Image (spheres, grey):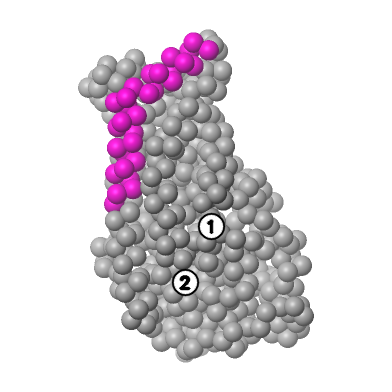
């Protein structure tokens, strides 16, 4: 289960923009990564020795399956129950928040406030949208606080509460800006085309989602973490990544490889590729540099590179685009019925009334929740393909690449405290990546080269 549901899950775009962001390569805790180093090193390390002040590389035992010692096994079992409970309660709580927002008639109060401020549409949006966004996020704080408390309790997060609160505040600024844009677009098309607003709003969400992917590493990520050139921190790692990138047929020069200071907030490890076009870059957490071998980091980035090479981004955009179009259409078909039933009680005049945003978001949230198992299944399939690509792109570059990958997943499970034996129902409902046990098994058994064959994606 992923742990980062960050500030980019935005008002009214949960059905589409949040889907795009979920497919955008970002710093997700479930990325294939690991905390230890093995004895095997790629040829580039011999040619590019590590800096003199680099930490000694630890070793790792051979992995044959994902297993944990008894005490850690019980700890992960308890956390698995907590995570499943949170997965069930969190969206229900979100729907309850929206219901009380409607019942307390906060939307009409904010609408009246905006209309009394100005008769200009944009000025009204500038008043209404921040009130709406901040209110929902404040009411949703209990689930965010609980998640942070649990991660601190289990040692996954080391971030203090003042720092966490400051990150939440910065996230609110991002949410408010995006909320203003989204609500302005939504109600502009609602008032211009009452019968086709769902299509025009969907069409506007396409470039907005792509823009988010582009600006995330340039504008949003630096608000929460410090980034430095990776070449200054670890020249050998930079050279190894460059070699893998070239084999993948991609173009990410060393100038777009970065070291991120994650240790001030997390114990987790990660490395990822993010952005598109000129904003595309490789990011390696400092915890990963400390706890992983160069071959393991290359494998992690190889996984992320797989998302690009295998066109998971455009495929994901297409899938979410189709899904969100259906969801917006269902919202259009149902909002009239919902307002006819409860609109007068909630103080909502009609669909193009700003106050209807809560009712519309309630509908979209229900439809999106129903589709969660489907989107998770698609995500697991793409992540499995990326695992396969990483094994293929590192074959020949990394000695015993299958064992390196297995050790990587083993240690990721230990650090992220993933339960070794999740039920099929749990995986089906809540996992957007394959279970660690399955990833280890695949890494150890995938061998198309054994009888002279080649990889499916890398020949």
Give the residue pinned by disc 1: 159
Q: Secondary structure at mark 1?
A: loop
Marks 1 and 2, how far apart in space? 16 Å
Rendering quarter of residue 44: bottom right
Residue range (magenta):
88-117
| Residue density around tag 2, few if under 14, some if 14–19, many if 20 or more, within 10 Å | some
Q: Residues within 10 Å of mark 1 (few under 14, many from 20)?
A: some
Q: Position of residue 207 (x, y in %)?
A: 56, 38
Is residue 103 on the magenta stretch? yes
Figure quadrant of the C terminus: bottom right
Task: Please name the residue shown 58% across and 76% down the image.
Answer: 292
Classify 20 as above or below 328.
below
Up-down relation of residue 84 to residue 169 (above or below) = below
Mark number displayed over residue 78: none
Magenta stretch, main secondary structure, is helix
- 22 magenta-colored: no
Q: Which is nearer the N-term, disc 1 or disc 2? A: 1
Q: Secondary structure at mark 2?
A: helix
- Residue, x 44% and y 68% (percent of image)? 416
Count of numbered circles on the image: 2
Q: Residue at x 47, y 89 (%)?
A: 62
Q: Quadrant of residue 347?
A: top left
Q: x%, y% of residue 94?
A: 34, 41
Q: Residue at x 68, y 62 (%)?
A: 258
The N terminus sits in image quarter:
bottom left
**Residue 141: % across, % down:** 42, 43
Residue with the mark numbered 2:
415
């Amino acid at each position: 289960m992923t742990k980062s549901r960050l500030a980019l899950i935005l008002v009214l775009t949960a059905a589409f923009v949040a889907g795009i962001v979920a497919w955008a390569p970002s710093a997700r805790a479930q990325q294939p990564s690991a905390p230890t180093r093995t004895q095997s090193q790629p040829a580039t390390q011999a040619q590019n020795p590590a800096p003199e002040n680099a930490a000694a590389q630890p070793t790792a035992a051979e992995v044959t399956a994902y297993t944990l010692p008894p005490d850690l096994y019980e700890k992960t079992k308890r956390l698995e129950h907590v995570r499943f409970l949170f997965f069930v309660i969190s969206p229900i709580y979100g729907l309850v928040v929206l219901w009380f927002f409607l019942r307390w008639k906060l939307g009409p109060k904010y609408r009246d406030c905006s209309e009394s401020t100005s008769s200009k549409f944009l000025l009204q949006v500038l008043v209404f949208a921040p009130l709406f966004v901040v209110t929902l996020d404040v009411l949703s704080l209990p689930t965010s606080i609980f998640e942070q408390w649990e991660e601190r309790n289990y040692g996954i997060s080391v971030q203090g509460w003042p720092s966490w609160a400051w990150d939440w505040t910065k996230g609110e600024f991002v949410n408010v800006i995006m909320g203003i844009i989204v609500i302005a677009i939504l109600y502009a098309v609602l008032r211009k085309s009452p019968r086709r607003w769902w299509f025009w709003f969907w069409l506007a969400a396409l470039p907005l989602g792509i823009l988010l992917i582009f600006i995330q590493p340039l504008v949003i990520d630096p608000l929460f973490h410090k980034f430095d050139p990776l070449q200054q921190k670890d020249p050998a790692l930079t050279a190894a990544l460059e070699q893998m990138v070239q084999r993948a047929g991609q173009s990410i020069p060393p100038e777009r490889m970065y070291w991120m200071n994650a240790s001030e907030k997390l114990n987790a490890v990660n490395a990822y590729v993010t952005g598109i076009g000129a904003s595309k870059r490789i990011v390696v957490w400092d915890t990963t540099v400390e706890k992983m071998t160069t071959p393991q980091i290359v494998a992690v980035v190889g996984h992320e590179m797989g998302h690009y090479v295998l066109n998971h981004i455009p495929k994901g955009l297409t899938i979410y685009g189709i899904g969100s179009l259906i969801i917006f259409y269902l919202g259009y078909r149902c909002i009239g019925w919902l307002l006819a039933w409860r609109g007068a009680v909630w103080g909502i005049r009609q669909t193009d009334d700003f106050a209807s945003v809560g009712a519309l978001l309630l509908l979209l949230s229900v439809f999106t929740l129903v589709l969660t198992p489907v989107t998770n299944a698609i995500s697991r399939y793409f992540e499995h393909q990326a695992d396969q690509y990483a094994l293929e792109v590192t074959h020949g570059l990394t000695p015993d690449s299958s064992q390196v990958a297995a050790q990587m997943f083993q240690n990721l499970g230990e650090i992220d405290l993933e339960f070794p034996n999740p039920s099929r129902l749990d995986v089906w409902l809540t996992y957007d990546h394959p279970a660690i046990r399955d990833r280890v098994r695949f890494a150890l058994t995938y061998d198309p080269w054994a009888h002279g064959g080649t990889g499916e994606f890398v020949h």
